[in-house]
Image (spheres, grey):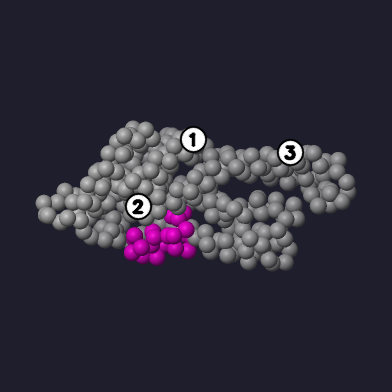
Amino acid sequence: MIAGTQRKYYMLGGKGGVGKTSCAASLAVKFANSGHPTIVVSTDPAHSLSDSFAQDVSGGTLVPVDGMDYPLFALEINPEKAREEFRSASQTSGGTGVKDFMDSMGLGMLAEQLGELKLGELLDTPPPGLDEAIAISKVMQFVEAEEYKMFSRIVFDTAPTGHTLRLLSLPDFLDKSIGKIMALRKKISSATSAIKSVFGQDGERQDASDKLEKLRERMIKVRELFRDKDSTEFIIVTIPTVMAVSESSRLRASLKKESVLVKRLIVNQVLPPSSSDCKFCNIKRKDQMRALDMILNDSELMDLRIVQAPLVDVEIRGVPALRFMGDIVWK
């Protein structure tokens, strides 16, 4: 995973509460200590990246991680704040607030389309998938912006399974939606003057169509990035329980349909063998062994590289603890 200087993307996801953030943060520390300028991004609405690094990395901008000898930056994307700002902006006169906000998220073209279609008054509530759209806009920045070219490893601490699948499927959704909008624009070319006044004059419609086409091209580029098996890998994180393993199996099946590469399954919080006669520990370990056997016999998971991360007696918080965890998990 540390070989080569080509930029690589690692997305860690799974059921909520399985330790995705700790695994993502420890992987980012491992990459940085191996000489790779690294960014770790949290798209989980329930952020805990700041807790993992024991410093504030919120605010939606890149923050250098303290205690590192090599470049490591962290970023928390705050979808709740984004939704509030979007709701507030949509109520401003003329919809200019919407455009300013969407511009700041790298989605200016989409805002212009909403303005030209006179739909601002309908946006009292944010559209579905706004948080995923914001995350994708950040990925666009990583791919295209000059300031990010130095980074050779980008690690994503993703939201729980359902959010992650929306994130992965959104480029296809927008691609199809934009195609339908462009087809609709062609059909209304001979519409009445009243309809023309809503969608703009011919020259304006052509300009808007060009912008829509550019937006679609950006979405296609993001989709190709997620499906590029040479640069992107999704790592599933789970814990040894029947419920978590079952959800991990469904996640792997969905990722297959999206043509996203999965090579590793991290099984977190595995109880180490104990020489004590603790009844609770023995029962818990037997339950975990049944869950591990489930993985080995699951058609979606059995071909993955299984990495067991033991339950440790210290809290994984701060760079030294993350380095310790990384040495165990990311051998």
Q: Label 2 belongs to which residue?
A: 18
Q: Amino acid at mark 3?
A: Ala
- Assess disc 3: are there few (<14), some (14-19) or many (≥20) residues with their C-alpha within 10 Å of its C-alpha: few
Residue 147, x across and y down, in percent: 48, 51
Q: Amino acid at mark 2?
A: Val
Identify the element where label 2 is drawn. loop
Q: Residue at x 19, y 54 (%)?
A: 281
Task: Point out the tag, 2 or 1, that comes first from the N-terminus.
Answer: 2
- Assess disc 1: are there few (<14), some (14-19) or many (≥20) residues with their C-alpha within 10 Å of its C-alpha: few
Q: Residue at x 39, y 37 (%)?
A: 262
Identify the element where label 3 is drawn. helix
Of 238 and 189, the residue lying toward us: 238
Residue 181, x across and y down, in percent: 71, 43
Residue lying at the far right of the rendered structure = 193
Q: Disc 2 or disc 3, which is closer to the eye?
A: 2
Give the distance between the C-alpha atoms of the residues marked 1 and 3, in whole angstroms.
Answer: 27 Å
Tell me if label 2 and label 1 are in contact, CB under 8 Å.
no
Q: Label 1 belongs to which residue?
A: 257
Give the distance between the C-alpha atoms of the residues marked 2 and 3, in whole angstroms.
Answer: 44 Å
Q: Label 3 belongs to which residue?
A: 183
Quarter of the rendering occupied by the C terminus: top left
In the image, taking residue 211 as reference, residue 142 lies left or right, namely left
Q: Is residue 34 visible?
A: no
